[in-house]
C-alpha cells in the first residue's frame, strides 16, 4: 500500500469519555461500572464548502490564473500548454477521522492531461506527500473522459492511520457508482489533515487555455466512532440504554453468562432484536438496527430459572468495517455464479445464496479473499473494491472500512480453452496472470473470455531452467528461478508470453536441467575457489554450482596463508590461478593446494599506463628495473603500498591487492604481483567509469525485464560486475557521465511523462538519486552529455524538433545555468557527437550534413560557440564524405588530449581513424585501423578499457552475442580479446 504523512485527531461530539459509577449486588460485592463512550453522529457535523469565489482561490507558478464560479461549480483554467494551475479553498478544514466527497470534471481532458483532486497540505502552493488524492496520469495510463463528472470519496480511519481514495463514475462508489480508480494506504503523521485544504489541479500538455477543471461539490462527513459499553453484574435485573449516536448501525454483542442460567436481551424502539436465552454461555454476535432512534437497550434477567449463584457480563462495540461479497454469474450468457469465495480467516464462505457473504470486523486486519470455481466453471474476475485484481484468484483487503466485492464465475462452455503441456527432462510450472490452470500430470487447462489477454510466466524448479515455448507461444530466453530463500526470485519474467484468448490456444513450456559444476579442493594445503558468476555451495571440501548451458565461468584459486596453489585437474588444467570454463554440460574441476615449503615470498610491482609516478612499500625496499620493482619478504608478512603520481599525471588504480585510494595492502602468503596504473592529466576522463579507477566500464540493460547491470572492466576482461537495479521498465537510460566531479560516471534517466532523473553512482551502487526536471515536453531529446564549461562536471545538450539546441550546465543533479546555443538549425545537419577536439578541456560538437556529407565542428566555450558559429571554410573538418562512410565514435584514440573521429565503411566493413587537432584532420597520421570487418560485428561503445588514456573499441557480434575489445594505440590495435561469449540477446549496452 501507499504511504502518506498526516496528523491524528479524534472527533468527540459528546465532550469526551463518559464515566458512570454504580454499586450493584452480586458475587464480588461492589463492582465499578465503566461506560467509555466516544461517539460522533454519521449524519451530524457535515461541512459543505460553497463553490463560490469567496471560498476558493487559485495559484500557478507561471502567472495569474482565472478562478470563477460557474453553473457547474468552482472552475480554474489551465494557464498554458504544459503549465499547471491549482484551485484550493481559502479556509482550512479538519479532515481527521472523516469522510470527504468531491464531485469534479475536466474540460479539455485526454491523453496528455493530468488532473488531481484531493485534500491535505499544499505546502508552498505545491501538492506534497501530506495529501491524499485521485490522479489521472499523463500518457494514457489512466485517461479521464472529457466533460464527465467523477465522484471521489476520500476516507480517513478513526485513528487516522489509514486512508482510502476511490473515484467512481455516475455516483459515489458507496452509493453504487462504478469504480474508476481505487487507492489506499497508511498515514504516518496526520498533521496535514488537521488543518488541510480541498484542492484541484490541472496540467495541460495539449489543450492550452481551453482546458479547465471544475469542482461541483466539496463536503466533509464526520465518521461514526463508537466506543465500548462494558457491564458486569450478579443476581439483580438491570437495564442499560446505550446511545449509538446514529439511527442506523451495526454492532457487536459479546457476553458471558458463565455456567448458570442467566439471560441478556437487546431491544431497539421497544422490539427485541436478540436474546441469549436462559443459558450459561460465552459468545459474540453481530447485530444491527435501523429506525428513528439512536438508542439501543440492553437488559439482564439473572437467575431466570431460579438457580442460585448468578453472574453475567457483556460488551457492546461498533465494527471498524466489514466485507460484503456478492457471487455473480456472467450476464452475457445469463449464467449462474457457480463458485465460492472464502476469506483467509474463514469467516466469509460466500456462494450465490448470500449466506456468510457479509461479515463485520471489530478490528482492522488484512483479509485475503480467494475465489474457487465449481466443476465446469471458471472464475472470470473481481469487481468493486477488488476490481484492480482483475482475474487473479485472490484479493487482499484491509477491514478498517466497508468493503464491497463481486466475484464472477462463468460456465466453461462459453469460454475459450487454454491447453498447456510441460515437456523436457525436468520439471516446473507456468503461472498465469489471471484465472487458474488445473494440472493433471504434465497437462493443464484454463478457460478465459475472448477479450482476455493472459500473461504466462514460466517457473522452473530449483536447479532447472526454462528452455523455451512452442505452440501459440514461441521463443523465450533461457532463465532460472531461485526458490532457495523464502521468496522465489523473478528470474523468468523476461521470458513471459502474453496470449490474446480470442480463440482456443495450445502452449508448451519446456524445462531442462541446469548444468552442474562439481568442485573439489584437494591436497595437503587449504584455499578457496571463487567463481566469476553464480554461487558455489560448499560442504567441507566439495562444492556444487548450477549454470545455464553455454555460461562462461572463470574460477580463481586463492591459497590460504601457509599454502600454495599447485594446479588444476579434470576439466581445468595448468597452474595459473584462474581457469575459464564454457559450461555446455556437467563439469568437474579439482583445485589442489599444497602446504608451502618456502619461507619467503616475492613481491613484484609493475607500473603501467602513459602517466608517471612512484610506488613505495611500508617495509623493505623495492628494487626497480624500468617499470618493474621487486622485493622479498618473510612468508605471511603484511605489506602496504603507496602510489604517488608525478606532476602532470594522476593515479588510476591498483590491481592485485586490497585497494583504498592511493594505498593498498596484501599478505605475502606466496609470491604476489601488483599493478599500479598512472595516466596523464591531459587525458580525458574515462567515459563510463563507474568506480573511478580511470578505466571505462560497460553498462547493460535487459530490455525485457528492465534489469540494469554493470561490468567493471580491466583490459579486455571483466574484473567484476553486479546488478544496479532490477525491473526498471518505466524509465529509459538517456545519458552517462560524471556530473558531480567525483571521478565516477553517473546515470541519467527519463520516463514517458518527461521526468528527468539522476543516479549518482559509486561503482555498481546508487549512492544517491533525485529528480533533475519534471514534465519536460517530449519534443526535447537529450542528444549528448559533455563538459561544455570545463568545470569537471558533465552538462546536458538538448535538441527539439524545431532544430533548437539548448544546454543545461550541471552541478550534480542541479541545473546551475541554461541557455540556447542555436535555434532553428537546418534539418539537414545531423548531430554526431560531443568531445574535446581542441584540448581545452571543454566539449565540442560535431555535425554532419546529410545531403553533402560535410563534417562541421563547433568549438565550444560554455554555452557559447568560440569557433564555427559563422561558418567559414576552415571550420569544416571535411566536405563531400561519401554516404557509405559512417561516424562510429568521437574520442581520444592516441592520448594527446584531443578527440579523434572513427569511421566505418558500411559496404566493405573497413575501419578508418581521423586523428584530429581541433577542426583539422592530421592526414599524415590518419590511417586504416582494420579492413573488411564482418557485418555481424558492430561497434557498440568506445572507452578506455585499460586506463592508458587512449580510447579503445568494444564490439559485439549481433548473431552470437560475443563481446570483443580492441585495445588501441592511435590507429594501431595494440592487443585484442573476448570480454565474453554468447551474451543473451535481450541485453543491450547503453
Image: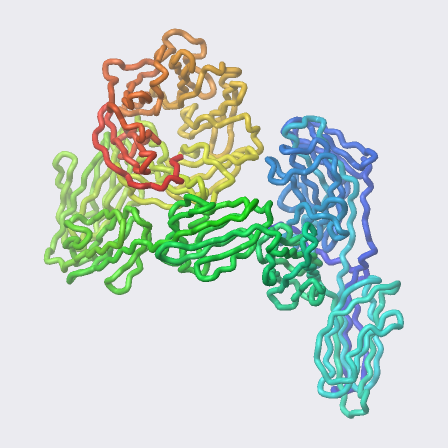
Q: Quadrant of the image for the C terminus?
A: top left
Q: Is residue 829 left or right of residue 633?
A: right
Q: Residue at 82%, 41% (x, y): give it.
A: 50
Q: Residue at image x 35%, y 36%?
A: 689
Residue 36 placement (x, y as % from top left): 76, 69
User: Is residue 158 or residue 959 the one in the foreground?
Assistant: 959
Q: Is residue 938 above or below residue 826?
A: below
- In-front residue for pair 152/21: 152
Q: Is residue 891 above or below residue 956?
A: above
> Would you place residue 459 above or below residue 898 in this image?
below
- Whether residue 103 sits left or right of residue 444 in the image: it is right
Considering every residue shown, the one lying at the far front of the view is 413
Say whether residue 151 is left or right of residue 491: right
Position above or below: 440 against 532? below
Q: Residue at 42%, 36% (x, y): give it.
A: 746
Q: Can residue 322 be seen from the camera position used here? A: yes
Residue in front for this viewpoint, 88 or 69: 69
The quadrant where residue 956 appears = top left
Is 668 placed left or right of 24 in the picture? left
Residue 557 horizontal/vertical position (percent): 22, 53
Q: Using the rendered view, name the quadrant where residue 427 is placed.
A: bottom left
What is the x, y in percent for residue 822? 50, 16
Does the image show residue 903?
A: no
Amino acid at each position: 500500500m501507499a504511504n502518506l504523512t498526516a496528523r491524528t485527531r479524534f472527533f468527540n461530539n459528546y465532550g469526551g469519555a463518559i464515566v458512570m459509577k454504580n454499586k450493584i449486588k452480586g458475587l464480588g460485592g461492589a463492582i465499578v461500572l465503566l461506560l467509555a463512550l466516544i461517539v460522533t453522529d454519521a449524519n451530524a457535523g457535515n461541512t459543505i464548502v460553497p463553490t463560490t469565489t469567496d471560498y476558493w482561490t487559485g495559484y500557478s507558478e507561471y502567472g495569474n490564473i482565472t478562478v470563477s464560479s460557474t453553473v457547474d461549480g468552482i472552475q480554474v483554467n489551465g494557464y498554458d500548454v504544459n503549465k499547471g494551475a491549482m484551485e484550493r479553498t481559502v479556509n482550512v478544514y479538519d479532515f481527521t477521522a472523516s469522510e470527504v466527497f468531491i464531485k469534479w470534471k475536466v474540460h479539455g481532458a485526454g491523453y496528455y492531461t493530468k488532473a488531481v483532486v484531493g485534500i491535505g497540505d499544499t505546502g508552498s502552493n505545491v501538492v506534497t506527500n501530506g495529501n491524499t488524492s485521485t490522479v489521472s496520469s499523463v500518457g494514457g495510463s489512466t485517461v479521464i473522459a472529457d466533460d464527465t463528472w467523477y465522484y471521489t470519496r476520500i476516507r480517513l480511519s478513526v485513528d487516522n492511520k489509514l486512508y482510502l481514495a476511490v473515484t467512481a463514475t455516475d455516483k459515489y462508489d458507496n452509493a453504487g457508482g462504478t469504480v474508476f480508480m481505487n487507492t489506499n494506504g497508511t498515514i504516518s503523521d496526520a498533521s496535514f489533515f488537521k488543518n488541510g485544504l480541498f484542492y484541484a489541479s490541472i496540467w495541460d500538455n495539449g489543450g492550452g487555455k481551453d482546458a479547465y477543471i471544475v469542482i461541483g461539490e466539496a463536503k466533509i462527513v464526520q465518521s461514526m466512532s463508537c466506543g465500548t459499553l462494558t457491564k458486569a453484574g450478579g443476581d439483580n435485573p438491570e437495564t442499560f440504554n446505550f446511545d449509538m449516536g446514529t439511527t442506523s448501525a451495526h454492532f457487536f454483542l459479546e457476553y458471558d453468562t458463565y455456567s448458570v442460567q442467566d439471560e441478556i436481551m437487546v431491544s431497539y424502539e421497544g422490539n427485541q432484536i436478540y436474546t441469549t436465552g436462559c443459558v450459561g454461555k460465552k459468545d459474540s454476535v453481530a447485530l444491527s438496527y435501523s429506525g428513528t432512534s439512536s438508542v439501543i437497550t440492553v437488559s439482564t434477567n439473572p437467575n431466570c430459572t431460579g438457580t442460585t449463584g448468578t453472574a453475567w457480563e457483556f460488551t457492546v462495540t461498533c465494527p471498524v468495517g466489514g466485507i460484503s461479497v456478492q457471487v455473480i454469474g456472467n450476464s452475457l450468457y445469463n449464467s449462474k455464479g457457480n463458485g465460492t469465495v472464502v476469506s483467509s480467516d474463514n469467516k466469509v464462505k460466500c456462494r450465490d445464496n448470500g449466506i456468510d457473504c457479509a461479515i463485520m470486523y471489530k478490528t482492522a486486519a488484512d483479509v485475503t479473499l480467494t475465489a474457487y470455481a465449481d466443476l465446469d466453471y471458471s472464475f472470470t474476475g473481481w469487481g468493486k473494491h477488488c476490481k484492480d485484481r482483475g482475474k487473479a484468484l485472490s484479493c487482499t483487503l484491509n477491514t478498517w472500512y466497508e468493503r464491497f466485492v463481486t466475484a464472477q464465475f462463468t460456465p466453461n462452455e462459453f469460454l475459450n480453452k487454454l491447453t498447456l503441456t510441460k515437456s523436457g527432462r525436468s520439471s516446473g510450472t507456468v503461472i498465469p496472470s489471471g484465472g487458474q490452470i488445473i494440472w493433471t500430470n504434465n497437462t493443464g487447462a484454463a478457460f478465459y473470455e475472448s477479450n482476455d489477454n493472459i500473461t504466462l510466466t514460466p517457473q522452473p524448479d530449483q536447479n532447472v531452467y526454462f528452455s523455451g515455448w512452442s505452440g501459440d507461444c514461441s521463443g523465450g530466453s533461457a532463465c532460472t528461478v531461485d526458490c532457495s530463500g523464502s521468496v522465489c526470485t523473478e528470474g523468468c519474467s523476461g521470458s513471459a508470453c502474453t496470449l490474446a484468448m480470442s480463440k482456443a490456444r495450445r502452449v508448451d513450456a519446456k524445462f531442462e536441467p541446469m548444468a552442474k559444476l562439481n568442485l573439489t579442493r584437494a591436497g595437503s594445503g587449504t584455499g578457496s575457489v571463487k567463481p566469476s558468476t553464480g554461487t558455489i555451495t560448499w560442504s567441507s571440501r566439495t562444492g556444487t554450482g548450477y549454470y545455464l548451458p553455454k555460461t562462461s565461468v572463470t574460477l580463481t584459486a586463492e591459497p590460504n596463508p601457509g599454502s600454495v596453489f599447485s594446479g588444476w585437474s579434470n576439466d581445468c588444467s595448468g597452474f595459473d590461478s584462474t581457469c575459464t570454463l564454457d559450461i555446455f554440460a556437467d563439469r568437474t574441476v579439482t583445485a589442489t593446494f599444497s602446504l608451502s615449503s618456502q619461507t619467503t615470498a616475492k613481491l613484484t610491482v609493475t607500473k603501467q599506463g602513459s602517466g608517471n609516478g612512484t610506488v613505495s612499500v611500508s617495509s623493505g625496499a623495492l628494487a626497480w628495473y624500468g617499470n618493474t620493482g621487486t622485493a622479498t619478504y618473510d612468508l605471511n608478512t603484511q605489506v602496504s603500498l603507496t602510489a604517488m603520481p608525478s606532476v602532470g599525471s594522476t593515479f588510476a588504480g591498483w590491481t592485485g591487492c586490497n585497494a583504498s585510494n592511493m594505498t593498498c595492502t596484501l599478505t605475502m602468503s606466496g609470491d604476489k604481483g601488483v599493478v599500479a596504473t598512472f595516466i596523464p592529466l591531459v587525458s580525458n576522463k574515462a567515459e563510463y567509469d563507474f568506480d573511478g579507477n580511470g578505466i571505462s566500464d560497460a553498462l547493460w540493460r535487459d530490455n525485457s525485464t528492465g534489469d540494469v547491470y554493470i561490468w567493471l572492466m580491466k583490459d579486455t576482461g571483466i574484473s567484476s560486475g553486479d546488478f544496479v537495479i532490477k525491473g526498471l521498465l518505466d524509465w529509459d537510460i538517456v545519458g552517462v557521465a560524471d556530473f558531480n566531479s567525483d571521478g565516477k560516471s553517473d546515470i541519467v534517466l527519463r520516463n514517458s511523462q518527461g521526468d528527468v532523473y539522476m543516479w549518482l553512482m559509486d561503482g555498481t551502487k546508487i549512492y544517491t538519486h533525485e529528480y533533475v526536471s519534471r514534465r519536460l515536453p517530449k519534443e526535447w531529446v537529450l542528444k549528448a552529455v559533455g563538459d561544455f564549461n570545463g568545470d569537471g562536471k558533465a552538462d546536458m545538450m538538448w535538441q527539439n524538433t524545431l532544430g533548437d539546441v539548448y544546454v543545461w550546465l550541471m552541478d550534480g543533479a542541479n541545473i546551475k545555468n541554461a541557455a540556447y546555443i542555436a535555434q532553428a538549425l537546418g534539418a539537414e545537419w545531423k548531430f554526431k557527437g560531443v568531445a574535446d577536439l581542441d584540448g581545452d578541456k571543454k566539449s565540442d560538437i560535431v555535425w554532419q550534413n546529410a545531403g553533402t556529407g560535410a563534417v562541421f565542428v563547433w568549438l565550444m566555450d560554455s554555452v557559447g560557440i568560440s569557433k564555427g558559429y559563422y561558418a567559414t571554410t576552415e571550420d569544416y573538418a571535411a566536405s563531400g564524405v561519401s554516404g557509405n562512410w559512417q561516424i562510429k565514435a568521437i574520442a581520444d584514440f592516441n592520448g594527446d588530449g584531443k578527440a579523434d573521429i572513427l569511421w566505418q565503411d558500411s559496404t566493405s566493413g573497413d575501419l578508418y581513424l581521423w586523428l584530429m587537432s581541433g577542426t583539422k584532420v592530421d592526414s599524415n597520421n590518419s590511417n586504416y585501423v582494420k579492413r573488411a570487418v564482418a557485418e555481424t560485428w558492430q561497434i557498440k561503445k568506445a572507452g578506455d578499457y585499460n586506463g592508458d588514456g587512449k580510447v579503445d573499441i568494444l564490439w559485439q557480434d549481433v548473431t552470437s552475442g560475443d563481446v570483443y575489445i580492441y585495445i588501441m594505440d592511435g590507429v594501431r590495435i595494440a592487443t585484442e580479446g573476448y570480454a565474453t561469449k554468447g551474451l543473451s540477446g535481450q541485453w543491450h549496452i547503453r
